[in-house]
Image (cartoon, rainbow, N blue to C red):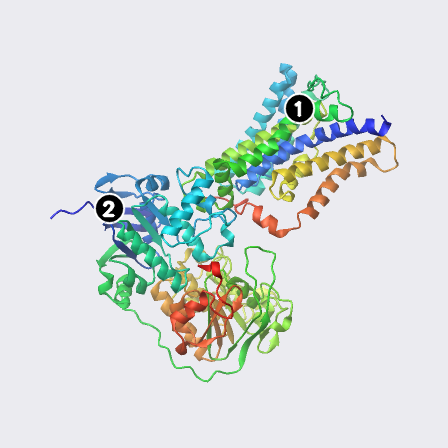
């Protein structure tokens, strides 16, 4: 029996960074036409490995064979010449350029703009990825931006397509459509290397999975024969405990009331909030779903006090109008918040953990006495957070940026929760956080709510919202849907709301 | 022909000449900033360009050689800036300010022996028929070649940025250097070339001042034009056409205030000398209040240090 040569074969790939071994003797075999999942926690070495395949990084040791021949991939252009395309997790797009210009930049022989635009229209039509080549990228939804990346790869007639966390920004319906496109590509013989945290979709989509842990391959399997739980346990190497959802107690008094909140902004890249109203009561978790860019950032800013709102009464904390108050005054009213960006908003990257603990905890802990910082208390406060939330770090002196995403997130959430807030607002609590840390964060949020605080979670991750929330509402184009009890709704229903199917008929050109 | 109309020709001609150094420097800086680099050393590069251009022209007797030397000296200064900021990852703002201070001192040092030396005038263009036209003839068709070169650079820079692939790549690098790097573009090389171009243009602007506009060498001859050029780029929202309008405005007010001074009106001359700067800044601030336009045209990576491995 003879097989066609493997599309790509990696043997003994090793890559060392200062202080860590990112890839250690990694072997990987990809066959023509297969959809191959690459699984692993953050820091397992997935990104490093695909960057080596795409020529962004170079391996210190090891062999790469392409269609049966030894090869060297000097740079991304070299990878593209071989027929390797990559869709990045954080899109490599240029906001102020048009779709056609963006695609042209990713091609080696783009030719003049007009024929290129025609080819873009044709290819996007063929794979059901409708796109207008003349639109500017900043006017596109996140799903449409991803199409730009995919079409850019498809124009090069790829033999291997690498997808790095492609669905983390998509609605469930958009993800389903993406899977159809990928299956079609695979049927035409293209190999797809698929990286994702979402185990259910890997089970639905992929033929084979390779699991990385700590830079090494720890196993491979047929994901269709595994459960999400068994896959997760392969990734983290231990048993996984999922947070128990206790039945909700009686919801108490409203802690946060938002009434007819609208915002205006000069920034053409932002989404204005339009007449948003909701309330969060003591003891409950309200989840706000929605695809990024539908007003989440603006809502976070309006709630935290980073942006003031014209009518003070439109944001009320513990019944008191707070729209005109800055972040400090709102904290004093009992609000705590965890922004979406860990580095730069949630923590100062260059400061130590104890200094970062001081930044939001100084008033309520209290870490400041007559204008002077009480460093001893700040240190013990930081150590309390590290202990209570199992933050892996070499101590309270570590710089915030030296922590992995999951550990820093645990630290930031811990910093807020230990202040015993009556109201906590969290954006994307487990974005880019691995399964173990995510479970710990979820448990902490649920415990906080059951202890009588009101919790608002703004997230794009529907699975997370269904684990956490008592009620779910959806933000779309700056408008908020009615909230519905989590046990009376489904992922499909929320997914449709995320596509804008409430109040208004769907836009004709939304498809 | 009335006396007023007779004055108009020379005023128009003088205005175009006064706008020229600004146009060179600002167009150069525009390309630099579009690539995502903020070089605050324009004033310094202009001064070094001015003194080197002047020195070479005096030694060789050729003003063409002077202009080339001015451009080369400006590019040399820019290369220094490029090595520091792009290769050694120094802070662009601090390095740019240092470059200006360095240029002020260096040009004074080189220029010591050249103060007060006369220099042959740069020949002006003469097109039979056109140059003889009444009023506008001398202004539009009787200038030095450098004035036309600066004007031609406006559409040329626009065409390069918005119609060529190289221009598209340059804008992409300025917009998002990480993405451009991920696509395989040589961010540092592209920026270095842009910085060199900007330096050469600033040097030319400086050489135009010392060889043609004044023509002589005096310490601090650029008298803040480098800073105005920087402001012009931002207020013109990185559009070459708007840079041209701003430069003309500056040139126009410069000449107008000179004439007012000449008329002997009782306003302190310092106040009048201030006017072109003030007028340019005010007008440009007013027309650039459209925040959306700035966001859409400003290079998003402007001034950010790019580290290829980060």
Residue position marked by numbered label 1 in the rendering = B111
SS category of the residue bearing label 1: helix
Give the position of the C terminus of chain A as an image quadrant.
Answer: bottom left
Which residue lies at the image location 51% right of the left edge and 74% below the top edge? A423
Q: Position of residue A356 (x, y in %)?
A: 50, 62
Q: Secondary structure at mark 2?
A: loop
The residue at which mark 2 appears reads as A7
User: Which chain's residue wears label 1?
Assistant: B
Q: Residues within 10 Å of mark 1 (few under 14, many from 20)?
A: some
Left or right: residue B261 versus residue A375 is right
Q: Is residue B275 left or right of residue B207?
A: right
Is A192 drawn above or below residue A507 in the view shown?
above
Q: Is residue A482 left or right of residue A490?
A: right
Q: Position of residue B33 (x, y in %)?
A: 56, 40
Label 2, residues with CA under 10 Å away: few <14, some 14-19, many ≥20: many
Q: Nearer the viewer, mark 2 or mark 1?
A: 2
Q: Which mark is residue A460?
A: none
**Is B113 or A336 nearer to us in this picture?**
A336
Answer yes or no: is residue A176 visible: yes
**Can you name the residue that lies furthest to the bottom here?**
A250
């Amino acid at each position: 029996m003879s097989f066609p040569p493997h599309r790509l074969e990696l043997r003994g790939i090793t890559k060392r960074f200062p202080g860590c071994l990112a890839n250690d003797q990694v072997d990987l075999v990809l066959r023509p036409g297969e959809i191959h999942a690459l699984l692993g926690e953050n820091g397992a070495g997935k990104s490093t490995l695909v960057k080596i395949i795409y020529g962004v990084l170079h391996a210190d040791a090891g062999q790469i064979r392409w269609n049966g021949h030894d090869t060297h991939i000097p740079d991304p252009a070299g990878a593209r010449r071989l027929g390797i395309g990559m869709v990045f997790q954080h899109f490599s797009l240029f906001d102020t350029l048009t779709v056609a210009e963006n695609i042209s930049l990713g091609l080696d022989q783009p030719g003049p703009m007009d024929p290129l635009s025609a080819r873009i229209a044709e290819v996007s039509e063929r794979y059901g990825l409708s796109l207008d080549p003349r639109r500017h990228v900043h006017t596109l939804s996140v799903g449409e931006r991803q199409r730009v990346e995919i079409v850019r790869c498809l124009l090069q007639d790829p033999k291997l397509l690498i997808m790095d966390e492609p669905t983390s920004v998509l609605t469930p319906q958009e993800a389903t459509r993406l899977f159809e496109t990928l299956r079609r590509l695979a049927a035409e013989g293209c190999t797809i290397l698929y990286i994702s945290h979402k185990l259910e979709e890997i089970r639905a989509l992929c033929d084979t999975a390779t699991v990385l842990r700590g830079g090494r391959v720890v196993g491979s399997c047929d994901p269709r024969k595994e459960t999400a739980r068994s896959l997760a346990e392969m990734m983290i190497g231990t048993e996984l405990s999922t947070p128990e959802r206790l039945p909700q107690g009686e919801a108490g008094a409203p802690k946060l009331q938002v009434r007819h909140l609208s915002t205006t902004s000069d920034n053409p890249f932002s989404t204005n909030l339009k007449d948003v109203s909701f309330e969060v009561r003591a003891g409950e978790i309200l989840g706000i779903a929605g695809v990024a860019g539908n007003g989440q950032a603006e809502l976070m800013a309006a709630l935290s006090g980073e942006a003031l709102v014209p009518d003070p009464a439109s944001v009320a904390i513990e019944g008191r109008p707070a729209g005109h108050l800055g972040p400090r005054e709102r904290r004093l009213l009992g609000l705590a918040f965890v922004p979406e960006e860990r580095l730069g908003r949630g923590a100062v990257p260059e400061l130590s953990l104890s200094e970062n603990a001081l930044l939001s905890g100084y008033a309520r802990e209290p870490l400041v006495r007559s204008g002077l910082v009480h460093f001893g208390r700040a240190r013990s406060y930081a150590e309390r957070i590290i202990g209570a939330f199992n933050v892996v770090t070499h101590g309270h002196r570590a710089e915030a940026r030296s922590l992995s995403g999951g550990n820093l997130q645990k630290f930031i959430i811990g910093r807020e929760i230990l202040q015993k807030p009556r109201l906590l607002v969290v954006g994307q609590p487990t974005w880019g956080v691995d399964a173990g840390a995510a479970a710990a964060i979820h448990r902490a949020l649920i415990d906080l709510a059951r202890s009588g605080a009101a919790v608002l979670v703004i997230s794009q991750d529907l699975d997370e919202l269904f684990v956490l929330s008592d009620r779910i509402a959806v933000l779309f184009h700056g408008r908020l849907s009615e909230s519905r009890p989590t046990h009376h709704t489904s992922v499909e229903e929320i997914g449709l709301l995320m596509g804008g199917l409430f109040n208004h008929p769907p836009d004709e050109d939304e498809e | 022909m009335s006396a007023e109309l007779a004055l108009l020709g020379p005023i128009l001609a003088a205005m175009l000449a006064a706008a020229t150094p600004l146009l060179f420097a600002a167009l150069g800086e525009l390309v630099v900033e579009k690539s995502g680099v903020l070089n605050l050393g324009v004033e310094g590069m202009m001064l070094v360009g001015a003194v080197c251009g002047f020195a070479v022209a005096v030694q060789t007797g050729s003003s063409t050689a002077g202009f080339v030397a001015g451009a080369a000296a400006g590019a040399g200064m820019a290369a220094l800036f490029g090595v520091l900021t792009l290769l050694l990852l120094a802070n662009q703002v601090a390095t740019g300010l240092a470059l200006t201070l360095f240029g002020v001192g260096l040009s004074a040092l080189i220029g010591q022996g050249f103060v007060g030396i006369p220099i042959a005038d740069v020949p002006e263009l003469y097109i039979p028929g056109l140059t003889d036209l009444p009023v506008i003839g001398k202004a539009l068709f009787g200038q030095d070649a450098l004035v036309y070169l600066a004007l031609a650079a406006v559409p040329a820079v626009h065409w390069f940025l918005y119609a060529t692939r190289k221009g598209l790549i340059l804008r992409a690098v300025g917009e998002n250097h990480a993405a451009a790097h991920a696509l395989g573009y040589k961010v540092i090389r592209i920026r270095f070339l842009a910085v060199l171009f900007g330096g050469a243009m600033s040097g030319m602007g400086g050489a135009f001042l010392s060889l043609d506009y004044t023509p002589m060498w005096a310490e601090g001859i650029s008298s803040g034009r480098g800073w105005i050029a920087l402001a012009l780029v931002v207020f013109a929202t990185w559009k070459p056409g708007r840079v041209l309008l701003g430069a003309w405005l500056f040139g126009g007010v410069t000449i107008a205030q000179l004439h007012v001074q000449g008329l002997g009106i009782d306003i302190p001359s310092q106040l009048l000398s201030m006017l072109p700067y003030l007028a340019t800044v005010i007008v440009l601030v007013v027309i650039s209040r459209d925040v959306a336009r700035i966001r859409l045209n400003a290079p998003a990576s402007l001034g950010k240090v790019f580290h290829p491995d980060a």
